[in-house]
Image (cartoon, coloured by chain):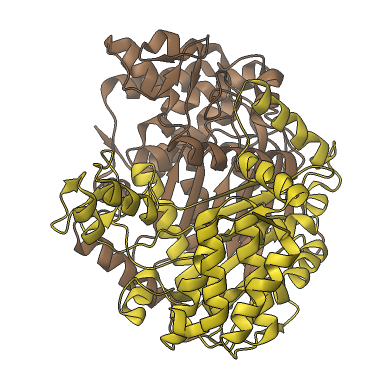
Chain colours: A yellow, B brown
Amino acid sequence: MRIAVEALTRTVTQIFVRAGLLPDQAAAIARTIVAGERDACKSHGIYRIAGCLRTVKAGKVDPMAAPVLTDDGSAILRVDANGGFSCAGFELGAPALAERARTLGMAALVINDCTHFSALWPEVEALTDLGVAGLAMCPSYASVAPAGGTAALLGTNPIAFGWPRPGADPYVFDFATSVAARGEIELHRRAGKVLPEGWAVDPDGQPTTDPEQALEGAMLPFGGHKGSAISTMIELLAGVMIGDMTSPEARADLGGMSLLPKHGELVIAFSPERFAAGRPGDPFARAEVLFDAILGQGARLPSQRRFAARAKALADGIALNDEERAELDRLHDLGLAAV
Amino acid sequence: MRIAVEALTRTVTQIFVRAGLLPDQAAAIARTIVAGERDACKSHGIYRIAGCLRTVKAGKVDPMAAPVLTDDGSAILRVDANGGFSCAGFELGAPALAERARTLGMAALVINDCTHFSALWPEVEALTDLGVAGLAMCPSYASVAPAGGTAALLGTNPIAFGWPRPGADPYVFDFATSVAARGEIELHRRAGKVLPEGWAVDPDGQPTTDPEQALEGAMLPFGGHKGSAISTMIELLAGVMIGDMTSPEARADLGGMSLLPKHGELVIAFSPERFAAGRPGDPFARAEVLFDAILGQGARLPSQRRFAARAKALADGIALNDEERAELDRLHDLGLAAV
């Protein structure tokens, strides 16, 4: 069966309200989760609801938290999520961030003390919708060994970037800095398949292709020492610098990896008009020349598949199977008792 | 033989002054080149002098250009290099950039209309010396195919990051977003060795391990589609957005790859104190905990080898062999006629 985006958003909002979240928090989370489902990003869709509820039930996130925005007029806008989920905090800060970027050319939004479970692309797309380019990053919890190392220290530390394309879907990428997602290793385990070389090390720090050993050991960063360096930069900028937890601290705070981690997030917005002012050429038109050249040689732009799924979902509704529908009903009826 | 850093800097400065560069330009270039030689980065050391002179001789860079800094009070500082080398422009802008980052929390330095030949680490280290974190990036010229593509479009597009460590060498990484440097492919060609898989495609866009075919075709980005996305972001932010040339434009402008390309550069500075203000913990102390954990499991920090070479060069002088010494004499005596 298919369900309209708005209808699914209402259902998911109700699930979170019934679980005790403030309506604004619940609606922001629902918009994020339904965006994942709409774009066929199943790993960030309704699958995430149970994990969010488990984290509420464990007392690791405050369902009644209201985010507060602080603005000292500088290039740094700060949202204190006060122990709640990140979504409402981001929605509170994003318009102010885009506005400050237009005023100063560039600005940063720091979100502190939040539980962050979403992909980063909804956030950079919110910025491209507001006409600015966006770069977002955050730690997660220690599950990746640095290149040359032997033990989990870095998080899967995602980084996302968005560039507005007037009249078209934006240029957006969003990826983990680990070579593979933890969920992919879990899928190999369930299927009884060995991992590709270079994905993980075992608990003794030795390379492994055994998914069980990998899950007990550590994942590896993408791109060897280069990806490892980017992941370390994310710990520094979006953990240490913003005065929030690094991935090893988040894992220690949570006491494991079965709930959603608490940490901060850094989102930077750039005004292309301000940066290009006084220089020849329109930056948006010039970007299209680059995109055309990428597509013209048969390569893809990141997120193309996601935008295609979105177009279909907006036209025809979101496809849910019987199992997914039953799970939604169960979460709706039982609330925190269901997880 | 060994030569002191100051003595080599004087010699290299004289070479550029004799070749017709303004003294300020010549000295800034010499400091950059000698920093490479000092740190045992031979590919950015005195080896670069001849390429710089060839580019002057070809009329592709203005030896008499004086950079101009424009400051509108926003988070964007702009240096117009006026067709000269980037080094003097960066030195002009860096102190103002660090100061603006301390005032606003974050700021950007845009360098336009410059010939850029240096590594980026001297620039992010100049910022860490001023107490701020730095992120630098620039296009180069089209020599890398996007992931899934078949032809040179992106540049080797380097990205560098620096974090200040009071009392210690900074945390610094600086790498090309291609899987290998063009020079490494050239070295394989000279040695008659095949390339590792995944480095390059031939002129028909097919994977190749033949260095000749690779040099005529295109290199590939590091880390597959993830590195390709980062490289594309660099084209957008440090090319299109700042109103300067992208890598395909730079290659077309230069008409080839034997001279140094003209394009712009984007350098972003962050004030850790400003970002961490009001939050628990000192960001510099907390960063050390992360570095200790990386080193404690046997992994390295990027640039460790470079800092070790630097310490030796500062103590004992820079080692030059007879051939290098003769080349310096030749460039000094003949100037542009030597290239």
User: Which residue is located at x 58 percent, y 89 percent?
Assistant: A20
The N terminus of chain A lies in which quarter of the figure?
bottom right
Instruction: Please tell me which residue lies in front, A213 or A47.
Output: A47
Q: Position of residue A37 (x, y in %)?
A: 60, 57
Horizontal side of B258 relative to A4 (left or right) equals left
Question: In the rendered view, would you say A187 is above or below A28?
Answer: above
Q: Where is residue B140 in the image (x, y as percent from the top left)?
A: 59, 31
Horizontal side of A72 relative to B173 (left or right) equals right
User: Can the viewer see residue A214 in this picture?
Assistant: yes
Question: In the rendered view, would you say A117 is above or below A16?
Answer: above
- Which corner quadrant of the image does residue A27 belong to? bottom right
Q: Position of residue A307 (x, y in %)?
A: 68, 44
User: Which residue is located at x 41 percent, y 58 percent?
Assistant: A156
Horizontal side of A223 relative to B97 (left or right) equals left
The number of callouts visible is 0
User: Which residue is located at x 70 percent, y 31 percent?
Assistant: A290
Instruction: Please tell me which residue lies in front, B282 or A271.
Output: A271
The C terminus of chain A lies in which quarter of the figure?
bottom left
Question: In the rendered view, would you say A71 is above or below B12?
Answer: below
- Which corner quadrant of the image does residue B155 belong to? top right
User: Which residue is located at x 80 percent, y 46 percent?
Assistant: A276
Tell which residue pokes out farthest to the left in this image: A204
User: Can the viewer see residue A77 in this picture?
Assistant: no
Instruction: Please tell me which residue lies in front, A26 or B85.
Output: A26
Q: Where is residue B326 in the image (x, y as percent from the top left)?
A: 35, 19
